[in-house]
Amino acid sequence: MTIPRSSGVLLHPTSLPGPFGIGELGQYARAFVDWLALAGQKYWQVMPLGPTGYGDSPYQAFSAFAGNPYLIDLNALREHGLLSDTEFNVLPEFNPGKVDFGQQYVWRNQMLERAYARYAFGDAQHLKPDFDAFKAEEADWLDDYALFMALKNAHGGLPWNAWEPGTRDREPQALDSARTRLREDIERVKFIQFLFFRQWTVLRRYAAEKGIQIIGDIPIFVAMDSSDAWANRDQFYFDDQGQPTVVAGVPPDYFSETGQLWGNPLYNWDAMDRDGYAWWIKRFQGSLKLFDVIRIDHFRGFAASWEIPFPAETAIHGQWVPARGHEMFEAVRDALGTLPIIAEDLGVITPDVEKLRDDFDFPGMAVLQFAFGGGDFSVNDFLPHNLRENQVVYTGTHDNDTTRGWWRNADELERHNFRVYTSSDPTEDTFAAQLTRMAFESRARLAVVPLQDLMNLGTEARMNLPGTTGDHNWTWRYAAADLRPDLAHTLRALTEATGR
């Protein structure tokens, strides 16, 4: 994949402003696209768009194919007659600067259930042909996902491996009984997915008309409690009770002295090889329906995975186990052609990871916040003069502190290294703009900056602190007034000056 010299902004849709407690795919999403166009940008990068579960992480979704119902624009449903004005008369007290996912789980799901009820009782029947077409086109994943979510709800939210053996193990008679018993719940799940994909398609088309492409993020692994794991159990390492025998994570690194214990099931590459990597082909097909460019999170897992015996309390006692990325990507290329993929090749990168990346000509990543640590920092691969053309450079990512916050909390050696390298002495007020300029001036073909850095926000606007849970992660939102035209004009000037 060859990316032209260009730039973009990282912002997850949940961080958009709006009246109902979380970003949506409506008015404010289009306003952000307009702002990107005004700023001369070519890309909008988002995180995974799947339905989130425990911990609210977009990297732990109930499905690798489904969309997040929280993002559905409720005002659009009102316009289509699926919600009435009276249903908006009494609203919860939303925090405009922070997502309350527990509040969204209760209130928004009630609103979406009402929208489906109106459709089921005969309102908005003009949607029926499109809904029927959607169900037929997406049946390969949608049928399993809708049944999974209906069963999960019927079991009080328990994970699938805690269900009774019949449904846990997908015995045909048990599934047929569940489809009959939960028919209405299944149809409602499908309808809500239809609403999400309908709105996302409209927004993506709007972005394309403005010259903006969407970079979408797909996690390499699926969540343990997901329809993917339940419906494709043979593709993973599970025992007879549906418990994983090994799980994913990473060894001790920059973010954690004990590593990160993610808990995702690991792929059975032998099984995947036997069926020609059909699941991966379907997954990339699904991603291409959502995104113009696909960023693969934890790309190094296609060369080898950090395999941790289950159960475990930390990720320390794992081992690297080879994967079959070459074979998989060849199968995907044979089926779908050359894909627009960015490889997130951060962390412990070994020659086999670099070879896999380069053999398929995937651009890798560089993060400037990582460039100035250590004693002999001059050999750091992330220093601007060491970057490659076929690379995507970031000031920071969703897992980093904001750039302003990073400078405030950087140790003195990092600050010293930066001053020596740049022959400058930035302040907390000027550092984010300086690092952004360094990213744009680099030889990397694509530069991406989180919106928080363009707004020069501190640690309070950090999106995620890896290895932690709680209401400080994934919740940040900006206010509509913060997306100022002068910020766009400044960014456009930098973009034009650096040939992006």
Image (cartoon, grey):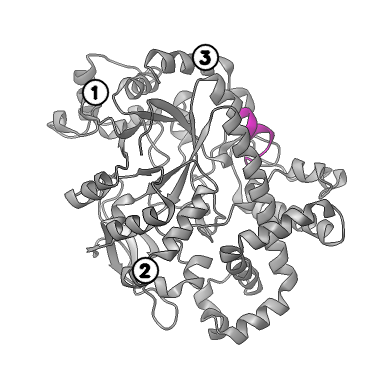
Residue 393: give x, y in percent of width and height. 34, 32
User: Is 27 within the magenta?
Assistant: yes
Provide the residue span drawn in magenta. Answer: 22-31
Separation of marks 2 and 1 at Cα, in angstroms: 46 Å
Instruction: Tell me if 190 is positioned left or right of 337 in this view.
Output: right
Marks 3 & 2, CB-CB < 8 Å contact? no
Q: Identify whether 211 is placed above or below 170.
A: above
Residue drawn at the location 17% of the way across and 49% of the way down: 351
For the C terminus, the image quarter is: top left
Q: Which residue is mark 3?
A: 489
Total number of numbered discs in the rendering: 3
Q: Earlier in the sequence, mark 3 or mark 2?
A: 2
Mark 3: which secondary structure? helix
From the image, tell me which residue sits under label 2.
272
The kind of residue on which mark 2 rests is Met
Q: Is residue 11 left or right of residue 173?
A: left
Q: Secondary structure at mark 1?
A: helix
